[in-house]
Amino acid sequence: MPQGFAIGPLYVHYYGVIIMLGALLAAWLATRLAVKYGQNPDVIWDALPWILIAGIVGARLWHVLTPPASMQARGWGSNYYFTHPLDALAIWNGGLGIPGAVIGGALALYIYCRKTKINFGIMTDMIAPGLALGQAIGRWGNFINQELYGAPSNLPWAITIDPAYRLPAYQDVATYHPLFLYESIWNLLNMGLLLWMGKKFARILRPGDIFLTYLIVYPVGRFLLEFLRLDPSPVAGLNINQTLMGLTALGASIVLLVRLRNRPLSVDEEETEAEESGNAEAVQIESDSEKE
């Protein structure tokens, strides 16, 4: 399968094209939501270059610090990257970690919001559905590079991996779970959920609630999919991606629950409570009257 095309002396990798397409569509969706949140859509395009640069740097750093087991077995661990900086920069060969991308992008967005006096929670809520969309599209770059496939499978939708991209222990196995596809579908569902939440519960949501939900839903899916992954990233004997996803989902769930418990009643809830209280008082007065 070709992984790119040449324009004169320049070779364009499909992986990079797909990543950029996902980023642009994510930004487009965020601009559509900006109007709903009472923000100028231009802030998304202004912040996009900084988020992209920080996201790519963070994604590559995550890969360099937590390379998959197969690369470590071939001597391509973190120490190799530290002594071969040109290879560490070669993102066109694949090797971008989503956790690092989210962390890097979030830090850049926080700094941008501080400088422009924009509410960080509102910005994250505007961007979260687009982030899920961008991830769904970006995962198809893994298909082009024949990476991020799962355990061997004979299911009708299993994909064939060329021998050059198979792990040494699976050279005789041709078909595998399309792990990239599972995650892509999960991200699309996550996007749909976040958009639905933003519309259905707009009156009671606080800034940051949508992003916290993203930090629950995506990690849960990624945590479960890691069980199918043949080539995890071990750090200190742990699958670092799965461990981080589990901790992130747990932490975001706790924060969201605390925020919900401490939330003042909405106008509708106050009216309902007042009505129920009034009914209860009326019943009590009627009961007292009967006793007299």
Image (cartoon, rainbow, N blue to C red):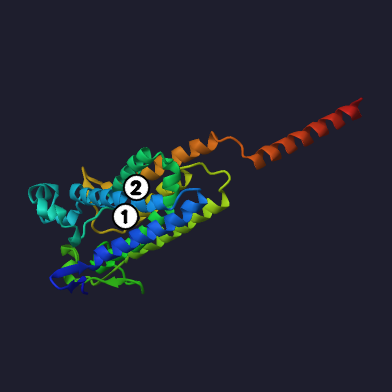
Q: Residue at x 87, y 32 (%)?
A: 286
Upstream in sequence: badge 1 or badge 2: 1
In the picture, measured across the screen, residue 49 lies left or right of residue 279, that is left
Q: Pointer 1: residues within 10 angstroms few (<14), some, or many (20+)?
A: some
| Quarter of image, res 181 | bottom left
Residue 269 in sight from this viewpoint: yes
**Foreground residue, 160 or 114?**
114
SS assignment at label 2 = helix
Q: Residue at x 38, y 54 (%)?
A: 131
SS assignment at label 1 = loop
Q: How many marks?
A: 2
**Residue 120, image x, y percentages:** 41, 41
Which of labels 1 and 2 is toward the front?
A: 2
**Residue 185, image x, y percentages:** 40, 63
Residue 183 in sight from this viewpoint: no
**Residue 88, image x, y percentages:** 14, 52
- Badges 1 and 2: C-beta atoms under 8 Å apart? yes
Res 245 label: 2
Q: Residue at x 17, y 73 (%)?
A: 6
**Foreground residue, 204 or 71?**
204
Res 226 label: 1
- The amino acid at mark 2 is Met
In the picture, measured across the screen, residue 162 lies left or right of residue 20, that is left
